[in-house]
Amino acid sequence: MATTLRSQKVALRKAMRGLLANLPKDEIQAQSHQITRTLLALPEFQQSKNVSCFLSMPAGEVDTAAVVSAIIASGKNLYVPKTTDKEHGIMDFFRIFGEDDLRALPRGLWGIREPEPEYMGTQRPTALSGSSEPLDLIVMPGVAFDRSLSRLGYGKGYYDRFLASYSAMLQGRQELRPRLVAVALREQILEAGQVPVGETDWKVDVIVGPDGIVS
């Protein structure tokens, strides 16, 4: 069963990557603009104080640059993902302190900007450190999603592991887990049941696409 699931995921990732690689950059930008407008208008976004958003890859996915800038400009606290243990597929979300800090981030895995653990000589607050306020909302990437809110990640399990650890920590503190909001290009949103999922795969709460919301 696990082997079948794995092969289904591999096949879908390969198909989606081929599809996304052929999307013109201006088409991705146009869709990203619509997605950003819809996301920023969501009540759960507007009411949030602590938001995590991924920093997008140079190509092949929704461009989150405008979302990230809007989080900073609105006075919300921005957290971005950083790999902390590649061997075991572990990541945490690190606080970003404004536009200057954001612009100075070096590029890491897959050409994605990642923060250093320290900022101005002190440790950056992180989601899993336990000393930060809980995240209200996590803006999530993925290779594919479907209308039953299933998500296919990039195959390393970073988000699923983080969400399992983070939710357990919050549960222990009797705090609510953040809302999981996926952003997806039109081509990434499939019909219900088309994304293969296993027991450890997290569903999202909302998918924001260029044509509206799936929830």
Image (cartoon, rainbow, N blue to C red):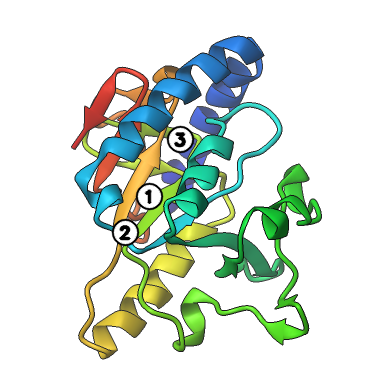
Q: Is residue 51 above or below residue 17?
A: below
Quadrant location of the C terminus in the rendered image: top left
Q: Position of residue 26 (x, y in %)?
A: 61, 11
The mark nearer the N terminus, 3 or 1, is 1
Q: Position of residue 51 (x, y in %)?
A: 41, 59
Q: Mark 2 points at which residue?
A: 199
Q: Is residue 86 among what the camera can see? A: yes
Q: Give residue 8's mark.
A: 3
Q: Nearer the viewer, mark 2 or mark 1?
A: 2
Q: Residue at x 66, y 65 (%)?
A: 83
Of residue 149 and residue 66, the one placed in the foreground of this image is 66
Q: What element carries label 1?
A: loop
Q: Cβ–Cβ below 8 Å for labels 3 and 1?
A: no
Residues packed near mark 2 inside 10 Å, few (<14), some (14 to 19) or many (20 plus): few
Residues packed near mark 1 inside 10 Å, few (<14), some (14 to 19) or many (20 plus): few
Q: Which amino acid does label 2 sit on?
A: Glu
Q: Is residue 20 above or below residue 177?
A: above
Q: Which residue is drawn at 76% across and 78% down?
A: 120
Q: Is residue 141 among what the camera can see? A: no
Q: Give residue 1's mark.
A: 1
Residues packed near mark 3 inside 10 Å, few (<14), some (14 to 19) or many (20 plus): some
Q: Which residue is drawn at 44% across and 32% down?
A: 144
Q: What residue type is labelled 3?
A: Gln
Q: Where is residue 29 in the image (x, y as percent from the top left)?
A: 56, 19
Count of numbered circles on the image: 3
